[in-house]
Image: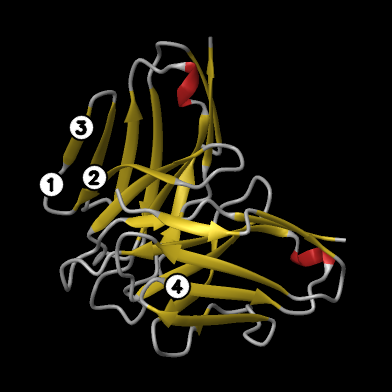
Amino acid sequence: GENVEQHPSTLSVQEGDSAVIKCTYSDSASNYFPWYKQELGKRPQLIIDIRSNVGEKKDQRIAVTLNKTAKHFSLHITETQPEDSAVYFCAAPPGLNSGGYQKVTFGTGTKLQVIP
Amino acid sequence: GAVVSQHPSWVICKSGTSVKIECRSLDFQATTMFWYRQFPKQSLMLMATSNEGSKATYEQGVEKDKFLINHASLTLSTLTVTSAHPEDSSFYICSARDLGLAGTYNEQFFGPGTRLTVL
């Protein structure tokens, strides 16, 4: 099955600085990579996703980059604000030709703290 | 985006009782729903994949007789924790995917979660 590793597990940044979270995956056939934000006690919310036919996608202050050769993708948050404080999860479904194609493996999560 | 509801949001029960959690897709049809369990400060762990009209697919280590899943319609899946024990206390979250385009991944929409506390 897919193996997803996420780093760092915790990240503290000053308000206004940038934050970068990185995930690596094992299934070279994976082609969809979402990032979720989860606030304490609440459901994960999709904040951005990328498909394998592009290397970068940006939405205002957040961006995701994908390196298929190296099998890693990263979340970039610029001009961080206190409300960005949450736990962020990456995810990587296995390739569609895999037996478990519907299952999504989540990373271990990164607790981001933005210090005012 | 699409809406997934979950009920109840919080339940406290005595050890040995059974608890049923409902997951509904409110404005779309979902042939597949997923059930996750999340312990404090940990990631979401997939428990099972619920398929409408067929048996659920359980992940390794998840007891199917303890966590009963029923997906009777395209908008409702239920998870029943049978004979709950304190170690079953956790945050249970369901998710659903829109039917969408065949052969492509679509966004998963998560329910708000159910916090189960077994005394």
Q: Quadrant of the N terminus of chain A?
A: bottom left
- Amino acid found under the numbered disc labelled 1: Val
Q: Nearer the viewer, mark 3 or mark 1?
A: 3
Q: Nearer the viewer, residue A114 or A47?
A: A47
Measured as percent of width and height from the top left, residue A62 is found at 29, 29
Q: Mark 2–mark 1 contact, CB under 8 Å?
A: yes
- Residue at image position (17%, 72%) is B103
How much space separates mark 3 and mark 4, taking CA atoms? Answer: 34 Å
Measured as percent of width and height from the top left, residue B96 is found at 39, 64
Q: Mark 2–mark 3 contact, CB under 8 Å?
A: no
Residue A84 lies in what quarter of the image?
top left
- Amino acid found under the numbered disc labelled 2: Leu
Q: Residue A66: give its label.
A: 2
How much space separates mark 2 and mark 1, taking CA atoms? Answer: 8 Å
- What residue is pinned by disc 1? A54
Label 4: which secondary element: strand
Label 3: which secondary element: strand
Q: Nearer the viewer, mark 2 or mark 3?
A: 3
- Amino acid found under the numbered disc labelled 3: Lys
Look at the picture and state if B67 lies above or below B104.
below
- What residue is pinned by disc 4? B76
Measured as percent of width and height from the top left, residue A28 is found at 26, 64
Q: Nearer the viewer, mark 3 or mark 4?
A: 4
Q: Chain of mark 4?
A: B
Q: How is the image coloured?
A: secondary structure
Residue A12 lies in what quarter of the image?
top right
- What residue is pinned by disc 3? A58
Q: Mark 4–mark 2 contact, CB under 8 Å?
A: no
Q: Nearer the viewer, mark 4 or mark 2?
A: 4
